[in-house]
Image: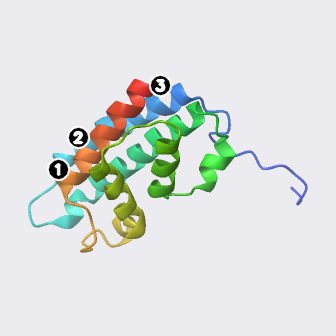
Amino acid sequence: MNDLTPVNYPGETATPAGVISLANEYRMAAVLLLQNGRPKEPQSRAPFRMVAIHAIELYLNAFLLQSGHSAGYVRGLQHNLAARADLAVELGLVLRKRTREHLHSMSQSREFLVTRYVPSGTSLSEINRLQATLTEVAQKVSAAI
């Protein structure tokens, strides 16, 4: 392979319906993982957090793809949920103010990375808030697509 060989990224040809389907699977997995969480053991909730955050990202990705953005553009947003949410809202997705604020908070605190490497961090979302955000994003994106 040389520098002129085009790089094919996984997901380049993904459809909004396919991404929604995958997001639904991650959402169901998050629900199951939440059952394994133990009180006063933040690390036991890390798998739920990671999968829930990924599901939220996938739902927003599906909405952006449905709205005409390329997979490359969406991939370029990296794990920035605030940027995804702001763009989706501009394109017509209606999210509650509290949910938008939560998505911004998660991006500012880099919750995706904290969850991966320091799951006992103090900047993590409340479990109930994360569940509520996942539920709302899932329902509203699914209804829009």
Q: What residue type is labelled 3?
A: Ile
Q: Earlier in the sequence, mark 3 or mark 1?
A: 1
**In this view, the mark in front (3 or 1):** 3
Q: Distance between the residues labelled 3 and 2?
A: 25 Å
Mark 2 highlights which residue? 32
Instruction: Depth check: give the residue in front, 37 or 113.
Output: 113
Apparent side of residue 62 relative to residue 125 in the rendered image (left or right) = right
Residue at coordinates 22% horizontally, 53% vertically from top-left? 129
Disc 2 and disc 1: Cα gap in Å?
A: 7 Å
Vertical comparison of 41 with 37: above or below: below
Question: Quick check: marks 3 and 2 in contact, CB under 8 Å?
Answer: no
SS of the residue under disc 2? helix
Reading the image, the residue beneath label 1 is: 36
Looking at the picture, how far across and down is residue 113, in whole percent?
A: 42, 67
The front one of 19 and 62 is: 62
What colouring does the structure picture have? rainbow
Is 109 above or below relative to 71? below
